[in-house]
Image: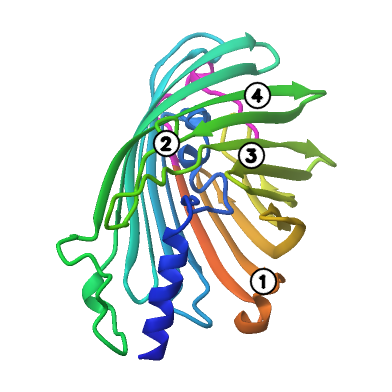
Amino acid sequence: MLKKYITYLLLLVCWNASGQDIHFSHLSGAPLYHNPAFSGLFSGDLRLAGSYRSQWNSFTNGYQTIYAGADFQISRLQGGSGLSMGIQTFGDKAGDLDFRTTGGSVALAGRLALDPRKGSFISMGLQGSYIQQSVDYSKIVAFDNEPNLPEADAGLRRALDLSAGLVIVFNIQKNKFYSGLAYHHFTRPVLTFYEDNIPLPLYGKIQLQAGGEISSGRQTAWVPQIQFSAQGPIRSTFAGTFFKYILSKKRNEPERAIYFGGWVRWYSGNGQFINLDAWVPGIRFDIDDFNIIASYDVNVSPLRRVSRGGGGPEISLVKVFSFSRKRRHRIECPVF
């Protein structure tokens, strides 16, 4: 009972501030969620991606987050130019009151080849989203009747949203790189549960992504990645690298490879300069057109005293389908 009462108070504290977005560690496992311009940036015709993330279950009814998305080529021209489209859905549940965030999006992206011979191009994407948040007031357990609960409130909020992004892909001495910029919440959707509908819009969010694939031998490569986001007073950075070992590779065919590595996440804001949040060791398998990525957040923030270092696992599955084997239809992209 006490646990549920404390959870209710914590939810009220969270509602007292503008919201922060859910997040994923794997860029390739939720590409459209990070940047709509990633739509169509893969070597194939159709890409299916899914992710599952669990967090903070060691000391509370923590976050359970899922993602599913698909993107595909609409039209392609010689050299990599063309149009692509993507759809995605995502959901997040946390706390004893089943506080949920769910949503769906449709993205449209256009690619322009800058140097077809070197595989350099720019992608620009636009994405419209539907977002819904809900809470189950019936699960509140308090010591006394709570007079401040909105009796007629259904505990449900809905909003429409808009995002835009830009990605540049380029090669330097046969090494592949990418750099991306995205802005989310152009409409500043209001998702408040206050009885008087006090406007508390979602903060706009800026995201930067960069990474590449740097060859270090015939069968090895480094795959560094960095993501930076700024939403309201919070700044977070996620950086690290995979070491890639190629098991087998045939000309014009998908390769088989295994990756080992890890990342670190830190943040600043709310009067604090820098806080180390988590170490994230990870592993990845590429089996032809099928990718499996798994990682685990090892909490090193001040919350480790109650979480005992446990953050949560994340697993992503990505499958690419190729219906055309013509070389002019393939887009040579770095590993995300």
Q: Closer to us: mark 1 or mark 3?
A: 1
**Residue 269: % across, % down:** 68, 52
The quadrant holding residue 228 is top right
Which residue was labeled with disc 1? 299
Residue 335: say if magenta: yes
Mark nearer the N terminus (1 vs 4):
4
State how far apart marks 3 and 4 are (Cα): 11 Å
Disc with the residue nearer the chain's start (2 vs 3)? 2
Q: Is residue 38 above or below residue 299?
A: above
Residue at 28% from the left image edge and 53% from the top image edge: 196
Q: Earlier in the sequence, mark 2 or mark 4?
A: 4
Q: Which residue is mark 3?
A: 335
**Furthest residue to the left?**
152
The front one of 142 and 131 is 142
User: Which residue is tagged 4?
Assistant: 169
Judged by depth in the image, the label closer to the viewer, 2 or 3, is 2
Q: Residue at x 40, y 52 (%)?
A: 67
Callout 4 amino acid = Val
Amino acid type at image mark 3: Val
| Mark 2 residue crowding within 10 angstroms, few (<14) / some (14–19) / many (20+) | some
Marks 2,1: beta carbons within 8 A: no
Q: Quadrant of the N terminus?
A: bottom left
Q: Amino acid at mark 2?
A: Arg
Marks 2 and 4, how far apart at CA: 30 Å
